[in-house]
Image (tube, grey):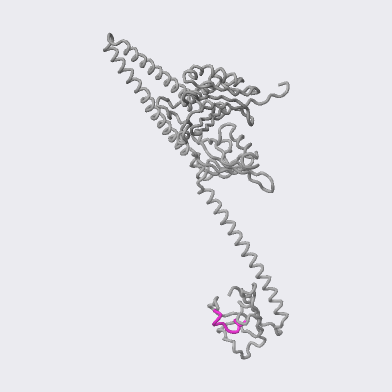
Amino acid sequence: MQAWSKTAMEECAIVDKPRVYPLETTGLWGEAVRQRRPIITNDYAAPNPHKQGYPAGHVEIRRHLNIPLFDGDHIVAVAGVGNKDENYDESDVRQLTLLMNGMWWQIKRQRTEENLAAEVERGLYFQKLLIHTCMDGIMAHDVAGNILIFNETAAKILGYEPEEVLGSMNIRDFYPPGAAREIDEKIHHPAHGGVGILENFETLARHKDGTLVPIWLSARVLYEHNREIGVIGHFKDLRDRKRMEEELLRGERLAVLGKMAAHISHEIKNPLMLIGGFARQILKDMAQEPPKNLAKLQIIVDEVRRLEDFLVEVGSYAKFSEPQKQLGNLNALVQETCGRLEPSLQENHLALVLELDPHLPEIPFDPGHLRQVILNIAKNGIEAMGPGGTLTMATGRQAGRVFLRIQDTGPGIPPEIRAKIFQPFFSSKSKGSGLGLAISQKIIEAHQGEIVIESEPQKGTWVTIWLPAAPDRPPGG
């Protein structure tokens, strides 16, 4: 029972009024539910098999009308009226049904509004919980830059308490000078994820203690009715990642230094043993067998020269300097470098073929650096060939780039060696330093070019150096 009329309450003398009426024990009043239709009783005192009687003190009933209230096929309530002066009829049924349907519509609307309000409150609570427990730092600010949201992770990363920030600080306070403006420009530029979006941008945020924290920032512009009202951003702390990268890089450097030290020790040890051994023999047999001592002195000179060459290459690799580029004629550099190779070519009975493009444009390069690359590659080709071989140098232009191809007719490079050929200190030659091609690759990369090596067994090796051509000058420029 949900409600009684005021008149019924005044006439009712029952002290302990029940509120719950089980359908199976309810008499005539339950018929509206059992029969799923309105029940009219205009002579309540007359015998009726459905009556169960009512307790002493109950309001005297002369006439009664009960109607079931439906919501779809489901009965949600029963309404009853009684003791009308005239008999109840169908017009009373219609009026009571209309009244109760209107009441039920109001109840449903109120419940819907309450449920919606509760759902919104739950949503807001969940949203707040999500923001403040997120593993990323989250900040939101209005169009003036005033901070509106500052979650726990942001506070942990940047060293502030949320209450220090909210309503008191501006987004510009969290970045180095000019950085906030740069971020705002990137958010509104289409190149970083779309207008109003910034994705995975690495920048620096200012900690409370003044230090700069590397972060990975993503942000979106907030709109209301197509009007910009602020920006929300979430960011990750990159300090641990940076430390790991530095430790990894340090480990790699130590590994390279260890490898370099072992290689240098090996390369220097063998010549020194030869030099020391022969020097002691010459000192011991100074007056005897001059021809043999002369041969031993020649070996000492050769080994000293080998050490000098090796140390020069190590120095070149370790103290690599940026190229001083200037417009120059690649063909002229190739011809001048080939002049330096002529003694080696003649000594090894090798032929030289030049196929130089006469229409090759001038390109920017460092003559000293590029000469070193040509000599390194050409010497490798000369050492790979036997008597009767041919070294070919060709230049040309293709797809906006200039190339120099150096080809030998040697035995070729096995695939398993070709994959390691640019690694520092790797050499397939017994007396190679393993730095010539590594230095050459560094030089060409510093020229924004690339080196491509192709090889076939018993047919030779092709080393192609690609360099960017100088942009065409405008007429009259």
Location of residue 330 in the rendering, given as x and y in whole percent from the top left corner:
59, 21
Q: Nearer the viewer, residue 243 or 345?
A: 345
Q: Residue at x 51, y 30 (%)?
A: 461
Which residue lies at the image location 43% right of the left edge and 35% below the top edge? 247
- Is residue 29 visible in the rendered image? The answer is no
Q: Quadrant of the C terminus?
A: top right
Vertical order, 304 against 451 (above or below): above
Is residue 213 rendered magenta in the image?
A: no
Image coordinates of residue 160 in percent, x first then y, are 50, 40
Q: Quadrant of residue 465?
A: top right
Quick check: 244 left or right of 401? Answer: left
Residue 336 placement (x, y as % from top left): 56, 17
Would residue 285 be found to the left or right of residue 233 on screen? Answer: left
Q: Residue furthest top?
A: 287
Q: Picture coordinates of residue 464 (x, y %)?
A: 55, 29
The span shown in magenta is: 22-31
Residue lying farthest bottom? 47
Q: Nearer the viewer, residue 85 or 32?
A: 32
Along the line of sight, the residue nearer the viewer: 378 or 368: 378
